[in-house]
Image (cartoon, coloured by chain):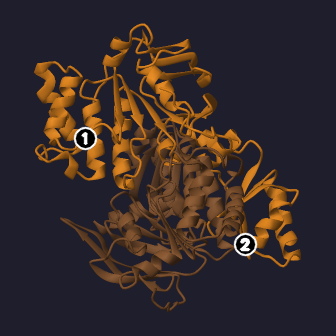
Amino acid sequence: MATAEPTAAAVQAYGLTKRFPGVTAVDQLSFTVQPGEIFGLVGPDGAGKTATMRMLAGVMSPDAGSATVAGFDVVRDPEAVKNHISYMPQRFGLYEDLTVDENIRFYADLFGLNRRERERHATRLLEAAGMAEFRGRLAGKLSGGMKQKLGLTCALIHRPRVLLLDEPTTGVDPVSRREFWQILYSLLRENVTIVISTAYLDEAERCSRLALLFKGRIMLCDTPEKLKQRMPGKVLVVNSPKAREIRDRLANAAGVSSLVLVGDGVHLVVDDAERRLPELRRSLATASIPFDAITPSEPTIEDLFVAYVQGQR
Amino acid sequence: MMITGDQPASAVSVEARDLVKRFGEFTAVDGVSFSAARGEILGFLGPNGAGKSTIIRILCGLLRPTSGKATVAGFDVAAKPEIVRQHIGYMSQKFSLYNDLQVIENLRFFAGLYSVPRNLVDSRIRAALAMAGLAGHERDLTRTLAGGWKQRLALGCAVLHRPAILFLDEPTSGVDPISRRLFWDLIHDMAASGVTVFVSTHYMDEAEYCNRLALINRGRIVASGAPTELKRHLSKGALLLAKCEPLGPALELLRYHPDVLEAAVFGNALHLTVRDAGAAIAALPQFLAEHSIRCTGLREISPTLEDVFVELTGGRVRDAEVRPE
């Protein structure tokens, strides 16, 4: 094992690039993650999340650029990286015909933990995960959400300093997804650094900071709060049973930059809410289209994503 | 591009009454009743194993209910499953297409599968290509299409036979938001032309696009209504966003405050469920200050569908996927 030269940052990527035939999956990504942050790599399928995670985990080498994770260079010293971090890929290797306890024992042995350490950590982690009563259950008999929590427990058993989670909540139900995040937040007390990827833009709001990825590049990188302040324009919600008529009436109205039909109304983005609200009300009244209310709404990360992608075109 | 459904006789296109499906000891669907009007987009929202797919399989005539009755386009699903299947289309993002076939080959394959009359095949395929924005890409291998295109192709294939009822299973998960919005615009246009759309999902952002939602947990409908209606209030109180410094000790303290029913970390802040928003906003900053915690922001926020869902299920979903086939 090489000597560690710990840098202050937990993760640092400089110009990280990965090319596959016909596509640059990761295109010069640079970002820094501080100890104790939950940093999100957020973007749709094909944005480059998994390739980035693999490079950070030292299991795929970049075509250009470099990264340090927990102070170790992922290109020059991938083995050292692997010893100090934990990487949970999308399909974490749980043994379905082993019990919860046996899976944990397997991973604990892999990292050379003694029995006492293993028991102490396993008890604490399983309690946090609400799984203490399922220690004897076969992993194959767990629900999707519980499997993910068991994966997380196995990934944490050796108390890594940096945790890399690749889309851990994909396909997980909302209740389990919440519990999963609460476990992540509880790890922050121990100053574990977490890098998590997700295709669900609503999960972006749960990260302390995030990079919004699209086509291998970072579009924006900041805290959720600061990102929302960069939303060009204001979001208005019109509730109405005649959503399609409203769409047709307002889609090209002055000051409206985007409009999306939802189940019981439309969401639209306007340049100036104070000026446009009365105009829009008047326009709907003139056309005799009924609506319950037009209310300003806080932008979501999805609104921001759409505004920026459309701005690039 | 409009795709018009066959015209069912009545305004109600799907009706289920007291549907029950048991697999041995396990009750997958436990007395579910609902109806959907022509042109309605109805969402089934619930975790894996809640019973969503079982309900949809019953409606498609693939499973017989243990008891209860369902009609689709006026036909009893248990008595006339073959006729029912002629009136429905099904699309799931994951399983619909053959990746090694060309776009046009997928369309021809599905036209054959759905017995589209031979003299109509060409015009239907042209309409599907136009709808999916794939005109000029007929010879592309399906595998090479971007996610949003693939998904619109899958939709095009699912409606070649002009079904009156369309079932969508998590149709837009993982797709970029712009493609997702385009997709839902198509769905809304179809609904406007009279097609009834069922969406089954556990993604809250897909649920927002439905006219009406049925929240399903443990085989039962636990709530239903328009998305905005469901979000209007949490039954037990209000939701607050609290920004505190330091966060960890604030969480520990607030958890045990009498006004706070629930406290959880959310990003760089806390989400608090309280009985009375006004009272809590008045009382909590002072309380925190007394414990040397700085409260830099405290305001009421509207609950998300997920908040509502978690509340209604009481955080209890089935602890194991029991899927006896």
The residue identified by callout 2 is B247
Report x, y in % for residue B301: 67, 57
Give the chain coloured orange: B
* Residue at 29% over, 31% down: B158
Viewer-proximal residue among B54 and A211: B54
Viewer-side residue, A46 vs B211 = A46
Amino acid type at circle 2 is: Leu
Residue A36 higher or lower than B201, as above or below: below
Query: Same chain for the residues at labels 2 and 1, yes or no?
Result: yes
Quarter of the image for the C terminus of chain A: give it: bottom left
Q: Which one is in front, B15 or A143?
A: A143
The residue sitting at 46% across, 19% down in the picture is B14
User: Colour in which chain A is shown?
Assistant: brown
> What percent of the width, then of the height, locates residue A23?
22, 66
Q: Chain of mark 1?
A: B
Give the residue pinned by disc 1: B153
Q: Residues within 10 Å of mark 2 (few under 14, many from 20)?
A: some
The percent coordinates of residue A306 (x first, y second) are 39, 60
Residue sitting at 39 percent across and 9 percent down? B80
Image quadrant where residue A19 sits: bottom left
Counting every numbered tag in the picture gives 2
Q: Is residue A18 visible?
A: yes
Label 2, secondary structure: give it.
Answer: helix
Write the residue at 52% across / 15% down: B65
